[in-house]
Amino acid sequence: MPTGVRFGVDMISLIRTPIEPKFSGWEGVADIDFDRYYLVLEAGRWSRDLASANDSYFNSGNFWRIGADINFLTNDPERNNFFLGLRYARGTFSEQLTTNIYDPVFGMSVLRNENNDVRASWAELTTGLRVRMFSVFWMGYTIRYKIGLNTKEPGGMLPYDVPGYGRTDKNSTWGFTYYVLFRVPFREAK
Amino acid sequence: MKNAFWLLLLPLFSCLDQPDCLRTADTALVISFRKLEGGARDTVVLYQVAAAGADSVFYSPANVPDTLKGVNALLAVNPFNTETLFTFYFHESEKELHVGYNRQVRFVSDECGSEVFLSSLEILNTTFDSVRVVNHQLTKSRVVNIEIFN
């Protein structure tokens, strides 16, 4: 039987949003324990606003992940976690790209492309820590190895950045989230 | 345990990677001329190659004034459209080659800009005797895309 549920928010996204003009987003997590196993739900949203000398790019979208972690610190009196886990992730996003292209033969023109309501899915291998700081407050991080990105865009523009996943130019990528969590206990652990 | 938590955090910030400015897309169409009988490479003399929508002709090399002589021709397709009509001017004739392709734009990064991918190359129409597409993607490797048999 579960002993409690933890809710958390990613501090990196919250800190980046006000100080980094190119990024806006948040991400949250909830997990519930089943002995040494944890059922994990994560959800979030991010947008990017980028510009180069001849291009402007904007995207925005939501994502969620579901998965499980295995805790390897089974004898820790504070019930701290060192875990390995898996996630299945889905997302929906839109993006726009406006680019000025100069061709030596055909001259200059402006191309405007957009992908709307693109669906994406991928998988993640995860590891990380959860440490009880005091009372019901916890901190922890998750390192993510993201693989198997699949997107269904209508064409005209190749996706650049998938919210929750990141840049699409590589077959795999890394992610990192740093959570502040609080735990709502159901009952005392044995 | 709490000390280990902070120590483990430190090296993670060095893992953030930077985008690569690798570009593979190209707008150059490589055409190879071959003999109709046997398929051997054929040397042709082109006086001019023109494309609809372009003000300039493509070739007037300095070493052979007003002509191009060789087995391959490198032509620029129109990146603002999904088809280009080429007219080849030979010594006593002219031929047309109308090609179509898919266009996809990819944003590389805010430092590197974007690039245009042209793929799914196909022959829409031609007045050449025999033409075939051997590579459907236009890339910087500049491999032969279309073979023309004369």
Image: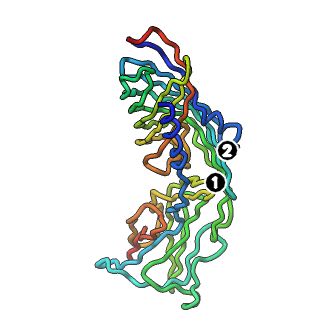
For label 2, the SS is loop
Does residue B140 appear anywhere in the picture? yes
Tell me where residue A32 appears, x and y as whole percent.
44, 18
Is residue A140 positioned above or below B7 on the image? above
Name the amino acid, label 2.
Lys
- Give the labeled residue for mark 2: A22
Question: Considering only vertical position in the picture, is B136 above or below A79?
Answer: below
Q: CA distance from mark 2 to mark 1?
A: 10 Å
- What residue lies at 68% left-to-right and 59% top-to-bottom? A109
List x then y, in percent, for residue B35: 35, 80
* Viewer-closest of B49 and B125: B49
Judge the density around disc 2: few (<14), some (14-19), many (≥20) Cα neighbours within 10 Å: some
- B54 shown above or below B82: below
**Residue A66 picture quarter:** top left
Q: Nearer the viewer, residue A184 or B61?
A: A184
Residue B127 placement, left or right of A14: left
Q: Give the chain of mark 1.
A: B
Residue A140 placed where, x, y %? 51, 30
